[in-house]
Image: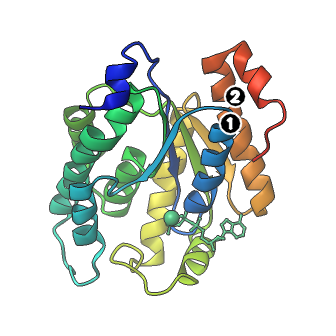
Amino acid sequence: MNLSIAMNPKAARGCFITLEGIEGAGKSTHIARLSALLSSLGIAVVTTREPGGSPIAERIRALLLDSVNTGMDDTAELLLMFAARAEHLAKTIRPALDSGAWVLCDRFTDATYAYQGGGRGLNPERIAVLETLVQGDLRPDLTLLFDLEPELGLARARGRGAADRIESEALHFFDAVRAVYRERAYTSPERFCLIDAAAPLSVVGEQAGRALRALVETRLGESADAFGAGATV
Ligand SMILES: Nc1ncnc2c1ncn2[C@@H]1O[C@H](COP(=O)(O)OP(=O)(O)OP(=O)(O)O)[C@@H](O)[C@H]1O
Ligand SMILES: [Mg+2]
């Protein structure tokens, strides 16, 4: 049993924030800074990632990313993504949100629409069915989309070493991924913050921090001003 829930049954549910974008866009770089920002505001924060984020989901991640697994069936890939997500939600995300912690998640279901829908060409209506099955009505409160030319993103990511199974896709795959991400941001502007990830790190960080602060202020009202006035990302 989650101790924090038992001790604090009336804790307000935390906010669920996702970071999205293609390889090398800056998600991992900024999730650390945003986590520090929330902590500085006195907000409990859990950072996590997809695919993965819980022991079984991390094992599914290894299957999904291992370049040995060439020729994986597209629907099998889709189902593995949602199998990992079901575990991640059950073991990590929902317990954290229920305890009042804010969750910062490096990729979530928008990535499935972008990669398996855009990149692989799977029907988004089928993805939506799985989304409802696995998540119920849980959706991110805020999604930061780090938008970047695939050429630039892949060049940044390449600096890290050997490409995994997804990173090894051709450029047109990432063009399709990016297009779906952007389309989703335009369709749901109330949830998305679209960030030009080609800008210098400090500018990207400021934009991401501003979007997060706006959510903090909305959720915590006046008290956020009192805590947040001096904090920087
Ligand atoms: N705005 C930026 N300007 C210059 N370099 C950047 C910028 N953002 C990130 N980088 C650099 O690009 C590299 C990739 O960034 P990062 O690992 O954060 O990307 P990512 O979105 O997490 O990628 P992946 O999806 O592959 O995990 C890092 O070396 C990072 O320092
Ligand atoms: Mg990363």
Could you tell me residue 90's position as x and y percent? Answer: 24, 38
Query: On the picture, is 156 further left or further right than 126?
Result: right
- Write down the residue under mark 1: 211
Amino acid, disc 2: Ala
Local packing at callout 2 (Cα closer than 10 Å; few below 14, some 14-19, many 20+) is few
Could you tell me residue 212's position as x and y percent? Answer: 65, 36
One can see residue 73 in this view: yes
Could you tell me residue 95's position as x and y percent? Answer: 33, 33
The disc placed on residue 214 is 2
Q: What is the number of callouts on the image?
A: 2
Amino acid, disc 1: Ala
Name the residue at 67% across, 49% down.
Answer: 195
Q: Is 53 placed above or below 216 here?
A: below
Query: On the picture, is 13 further left or further right than 232?
Result: left
Q: How is the image coloured?
A: rainbow
Q: Is 200 placed above or below 98 here?
A: below
Q: Nearer the viewer, residue 17 or 154?
A: 17
Disc 2 is placed on an element classified as helix
* Ligand 1 found in image quarter: bottom right
Name the residue at 37% across, 55% down.
Answer: 50
